[in-house]
Image (cartoon, rainbow, N blue to C red):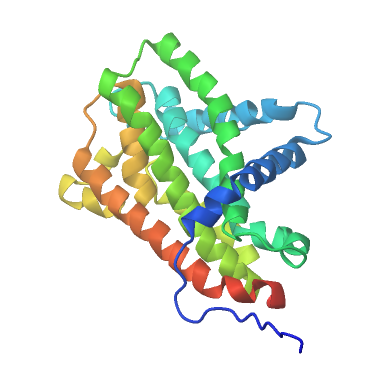
Amino acid sequence: METEIVIKPQKGWIPVNFRELWAYRELLFFLSWRDIKVKYKQTTLGVAWAILQPFLTMIVFSVLFGTFAKMPSDGIPYPIFVYAGLLPWNYFSSSLSSSGNSLVASSNLITKVYFPRLIIPASAALSSLLDFLIASVILIGMMFFYNYSPNLSGIFLIPSLVLLTFMIAVGCGLWLSALNVEYRDFQYVIPFLVQIWMFVTPVIYPVTLVPQKYQWLLALNPMGGIIEAFRSATLGHQPVNWYLLGISAGVAITIFASGLLYFRKVERSFADVI
């Protein structure tokens, strides 16, 4: 008598299996490395684009907003002010764009073999970390040029801020990538969302431009408090605003947790509809 085994997907909210994710950690590394190689394959300048893009953007913003618009910059030179904001922002926007489109881009892989689908958006966000590290060299050079340096607490805070940025990008990426599988309209929503999001984030302007009693509204945008704290941590020109950072960190954790839950709920249908 033959035994018939029927495999059915779980119903309702499916918890995240962290033990399974750990077992597939090597796949996470190889997918991240694949994304890096594909990004710079057959490019003349290669990883130099990771420096050129934020550097040229900094120059344009410095001329337009620093020289012509006279945008305030908390008493520090506008070029280093805006670059210290662009550095975490570019990491976030690149990670969000990559992770938001990652499932559709990996449709052939999803339909052929099983592995934790969470790895795909996570690897897309992780691959952008290399660009962030390379572009940080310019910020370090500017800090020497303008004579700014972080204090000891700022040095220890920076990795936590990068981790929070990663969590926001992955959390939003989980939402958008899952929705993009079902509704391909989101491939057009993602670049528009990133563009609008930048202008409601204190990248080109300081938080102090907003009256103090309303600054907490900027922190509801999780990148708002993180970028402000990143400037303070790296440049050491003012104390870290822990109140705004706390609000942004809470929102970041909420986005990440909700993204995990939603992604796990709908991922069982990815292979059928992608």
Counting labels gives: 0
- What is the quadrant of the C terminus in the image? bottom right
Residue drawn where x is 62% and y is 54% of the image: 120
> From this viewpoint, is residue 117 visible?
yes
* Outermost bottom residue: 1
* Outermost front residue: 1
**Which of 161/265 is in front?**
265
Residue drawn where x is 60% and y is 74% of the image: 268
> From this viewpoint, is residue 205 visible?
no
**Which of 53/75 is in front?**
53
| Residue 252: image location, x then y, percent | 36, 53
| Residue 272: image location, x then y, percent | 70, 77
On screen, residue 150 above or below 23: above
On screen, residue 159 above or below 213: above
Residue drawn where x is 56% and y is 46% of the image: 125
| Residue 4: image location, x then y, percent | 71, 85
| Residue 270: image location, x then y, percent | 65, 72
**Which of 268/231 is in front?**
268
On screen, residue 168 above or below 270: above
Q: Quadrant of residue 267?
A: bottom right
Q: Quadrant of residue 6?
A: bottom right
- What is the quadrant of the N terminus in the image? bottom right
